[in-house]
Image (cartoon, rainbow, N blue to C red):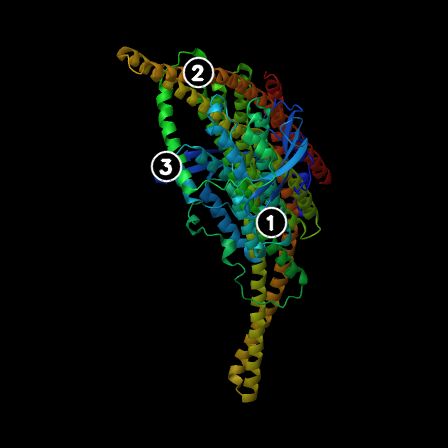
Amino acid sequence: MMQEGLDDGPDFLSEEDRGPRAVNVDLQTDATLQVDISDALSERDKVKFTVHTKSTLPNFKQNEFSVVRQHEEFIWLHDSFVENEEYAGYIIPPAPPRPDFDASREKLQKLGEGEGSMTKEEFTKMKQELEAEYLAIFKKTVAMHEVFLCRVAAHPVLRKDMNFHVFLEYNQDLSVRGKNKREKMEDFFKNVVKSADGVLVAGVKDVDDFFEHEKTFLLEYHNRVKDASSKSDRMIRSHKSAADDINRIASTLYTLGTQDSTDVCKFFLKVSELFEKTRKIEARVAADEDLKLADLLKYYLRESQAAKDLLYRRGRALVDYENANKALDKARAKNKDVLQAETSQQVCCQKFEKISESAKQELIDFKTRRVAAFRKNLVELAELELKHAKGNLQLLQSCVGVLKGDT
Amino acid sequence: MQLDEEIEDKFELNISITNPEKVGDGMNAYMAYKVSTQTTLPMFRSKTFTVRRRFSDFLGLYEKLSDKHTLNGYIVPPPPEKSIMGMTKVKVGKEDNSSAEFVERRRAALERYLQRVVFHPSLLQDPDVRECVCVCALSGAGFLKMINRATDSLSKMTIKMNESDVWFEEKLQEVEAEDQQLRKLHIMVDSLVGHRKELSVNTGGFAKSVAMLGSSEDNTALSRALSQLAEVEDKMEQLHQEQAASDSFCFAELLADYIRLLGSVRASFDQRMKTWQRWQDAQNMLQKKRETEAKLLWANKPDKLQQAKDDITEWEAKVTQYERDFDRVSATVRKEVLRFEKEKARDFKKQIIKYLESLLQSQQQLIKYWEAFLPEAKAIA
């Protein structure tokens, strides 16, 4: 059962709990197929997601059903899309990142080891914080897996995919044990070849202005999103560290305040209470920046890569088409194997044109989605920053008022 | 009525330290500060006057005051710490943020130090103090012996007192507990300063990155919004930088001052213990002299008897004197501690309220920036 409820602040949950916890919007949530992750369980070294489907499509045996899936099965599904030639003309929704609780687990372990060296209050406090951190990471990984499924369900073609339906419906383990060593090596070489090719293909100037522009745009955009993503992570980490410091300061002020019942001590207690509250707000600010800004950038880093991959596939198809043309000319000149060359050229032509047509639409949709997602998140970010700043301001004002009144 | 209340009620006394100026070049260079006094106290010949002093002058003042007054149980405020690295940067002429910060921190610390000295009713009477603020430069020698005098005689004392007055024992324990907590707090505030500076730098980096992203973005409204976001983050960089300075100047420096002051408080307790010991030693000596007299009487040596009787008279006088000293010093220490606590309460309240107000202003700025940004974000289409 998903552990709901942080110590306080229902806001943290409310936005995320309503509907798809998506960074994206404009996902046609129509009644024919709705997918979400209704539950999740974190075990020692794996996370089990309960994938819940509601559908009026005839393909499924029931109208509503759930299965349990693990991360590897999501990857299997993603890879099956990538490897399917039929989908070469689509932006394949990026795979969700692997759930990573290592850092959090390590911290919890260190805390357990250091239990003897701190007071009971300090220990309880730190434990609560680390548990909240763990919960936040957990929610994030759930959200990212859910977004992937929703993107697939919203895609007019991918939603009909056989593997997707199996993924959603088959209530046994899909047995997609992680790729074995040989397969991993093959993957590695495939990627190396692709990037070398990528350079080659990118060098060929496209006749079509639209695609030429998209190529230039995506290459630059992807790099800049990458940079922005890593810089935002760094900034948010510093923010969290500062909030942690304020937490410790509050504790020490509390200790100072409880040593006596003089005026000064009462003063320290009030200030300690203030810092306790403001640091909760600061931590919330960092968490919201993480969700609305860092996650947004990370997601578009992955999606822009998927878009680049689409352009690469089209580029490859173009090269193949051009090579087929050359082969046909040669065959006609020699008057040898002409029919074969003609067939081959036609196939390449069709493939290229099919990819180009859907790619154009996909890239336009990508832009629309991107703009909408940025808008939603930037607006929410600004609103949250304002809400927290106002909360902080009120706390500070009332505390200063009380303290000044006392002297 | 207490002397300090008299001062506060009837007379004005304002002291400030300003205008740090580098004098000389290379490794012999030093910073000279302007000490400005404005007062209506009759003990000064003029109402306003200024002098130029250097750091070693203040150290010299502390040495003199400590020599004269610590043994009477007074809590002599300690000067700011010597910093070889900080000063070397200034001497070598490194004109960067950290050396400017160092000079400012030192100026403020010297100001607080001098203010504490002159607002001490007994120390104000000392001619050396007056000389520091209104006559030609004091000798700079003596700064070489700059170890924190207060920590010399710390709780390494192995004197066990038969504490008749439980007040002193409890107070000392309180002081030691407080010292521990303040040191802890200081470390944490320093950590906060560090992280805020880091946050400032990282926010700046992020701002530039967002600006770049905005210029790549081909949707016009989004591109505009992103460059506005970059501007907000730029302003946040500045805000965090200012906040870190406030953390440091308002909060961290306050803690550092009081950690040093608590050292002086412990020194005054140690001093009281010393006078107690001296009294005890005198009593023991008197006892010995009496025993000697008794022995001489029994051994019937009349010639040495007179000497013994003289000795007894001498030591009886000493015992009385030292007992009076102990009582006097005890009373002074007690008075000083109470005064110190009052001053500390006032200081902490004032400074922390000032610090909270700076936090408050930060939030107000934050609100302004995000309120300006929100319509830009909503305008994305």
Question: Which residue in the protein does label 3 denote?
Answer: B92
Q: How many marks?
A: 3
Question: Which residue in the protein does label 1 denote?
Answer: B122
Number of other residues with Cα within 10 Å of mark 1, as a class: few under 14, some 14 to 19, many 20 or more = few
Looking at the rendering, in which quadrant would you find the C terminus of chain B?
A: top right
Residue type at the position of mark 2: Gln
Q: In the structure shown, which secondary structural element does the residue marked by tag 1 occupy?
A: helix
Please state the horizontal and vertical placement of residue A380, each as a whole percent of the image. 63, 26
**Alpha carbons under labels 1 and 2: distance apart:** 100 Å
Number of other residues with Cα within 10 Å of mark 2, as a class: few under 14, some 14 to 19, many 20 or more = few
- Which chain's residue wears label 3? B
The foreground one among A261 and A369 is A369
**Alpha carbons under labels 1 and 3: distance apart:** 40 Å
The foreground one among A246 and A223 is A223
Residue type at the position of mark 1: Ser
The foreground one among B140 and A407 is A407
